[in-house]
Image (cartoon, grey):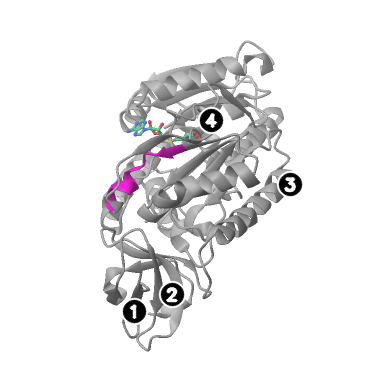
Amino acid sequence: MATAKVTIKKGREKPIRNRHPWIFSGAVSTAANAVDGRLVTVVDYKDRFLARGYWNSKSQIQARILTWEDEAIDDAWWQRMLSRAWQSRAQYVADAGIPDSRACRVVNAENDYMPGLVLDRYGDCFVLQAQTLFIDRHKKKIADILQSHFDAEQVFERSDMDLRRQEGLHPSVGPLVGGPPPERFVLNEGALFHVDIVRGHKTGFYLDQRRNRQKLHDLVQSSASARDIDGPPSLLNLFSYSGGFAIAAQRDSDLRAVNVDSSRAALELAEKNFALNEYDKPSSAASAEHIQADSFDYLRFCVGEGARFDYVVLDPPKFARHKRQVARAARGYKDLNLNAFRLVKEGGYMMTFSCSGAISRDLFQKIVFAALADAGRQAQIVEQLSAAPDHPVALTFPEGQYLKGLLLRVY
Ligand code: SAH
């Protein structure tokens, strides 16, 4: 078969030389013998080698780069790249002192120079997401390597994200090697969590928020002694999913949590998680309410009621998928943050997040600032928050920095 060759227009090769992994159609001058889902060699207008990657004419991102070296993308390449990612995680989990070091993100797609591939590990089960056609074609091979070189007992596929549609792919969920995943997986982050690998969000759990859950826990602990004696602290946990922030905050505390999510299944998981951790409570005062509601409406309701909380967590789903949706998303974030600010007690805390890749940290901070001004409150940034270190961001790929947040003290 003739070599597939993508020639980049004169003057458009700079981002590629700077190691950005995406090539959009506007930068492509010709694509000789390029086949969707197969490897291509990328060259500049003078036919000089730039990179090697894979092609999909159906996607807006027509090519994604795997390497900037003139090397073969073969089994040995995959083994090398997977072990590199694996070793960096071994370091992270050792440093983080996580009780259950066997749960973490192992491959973070473009950020680990394996575009389109996400791999999360829950004990002996690896969960694979193939976001692109090329990865979809290679998933079985990757699963076999995980089994033979990384002791995976099962590799389960959870390729059911929207992104696949843009690649002309349907959702695909099921075992790749080693049969179905364990019926029950309990993750120990200090607090315990049921992880639903088959039906849960993403690959079953929001591993990216691990550090931030821990920070909330630490904050509740350190504020406990300083707090005046008006009863147990309270947390409003909006977009709560399986209760992650509330469960972590309630460890060693009699905190009262209100979890709000629009999904009944998510709240059922949160209830199960609360029960799973019940032994850990210092008194029976700790409680969790699980409210199925739209968070926008519920915030307005609380404002109307004059409710106040010591802690408010806002962790909405992605509002902006493209640059085109940024303005609308900004209005959504502003509305949420405005009402959330109104609910925080004097001297209380808010953790607010955006996981939209299209919204920069700078823009997010401006939106939260505008919300604060309208709420007539004051707030200090105590900490900038991001995804846990097993979700590293390639410096050459700013889009990888999807999760950004602020820990604010509110007056
Ligand atoms: N904070 C969670 C993750 C949140 S994911 C954690 O740490 O694990 C976003 C959640 O928002 C999902 O569970 C989804 O069901 C929920 N959701 C989406 N739109 C919503 C809305 N308008 N109101 C309430 N919940 C919503």
Q: Secondary structure at mark 1?
A: strand
Sequence-wise, which precedes: disc 1 or disc 3? Answer: 1
Sequence-wise, which precedes: disc 4 or disc 3? Answer: 3
Label 2, label 4: how many angstroms apart (C-alpha)?
39 Å
Q: Which residue is mark 1?
A: 8
The answer to whether marks 2 and 1 mark residues whose Cβ atoms lie closer than 8 Å is yes
Residue 95 got which mark?
Answer: 3
**128 with respect to 55 (left or right):** right
Q: Which one is nearer the viewer's eye here, 86 or 352?
A: 86
Q: Quadrant of residue 215?
A: top right
Residue 244 got which mark?
Answer: 4
The answer to whether marks 2 and 4 mark residues whose Cβ atoms lie closer than 8 Å is no
The answer to whether the beta carbon of the residue marked 4 is less than 8 Å from any atom of ligand 1 is: yes
| Magenta stretch: includes residue 134 | no
Q: Secondary structure at mark 3?
A: helix
Label 2, label 1: how many angstroms apart (C-alpha)?
9 Å
Q: Is residue 41 above or below residue 209?
A: below
Residue 147, image x, y percentages: 60, 41
Q: Which residue is mark 2?
A: 16
- Magenta residues, as a range? 157-166
Sequence-wise, which precedes: disc 2 or disc 4? Answer: 2
Q: Amino acid at mark 4?
A: Gly
Label 1, label 3: how many angstroms apart (C-alpha)?
43 Å
Residue 329, image x, y percentages: 31, 48
Q: Which residue sits at x=62%, y=44%?
A: 148
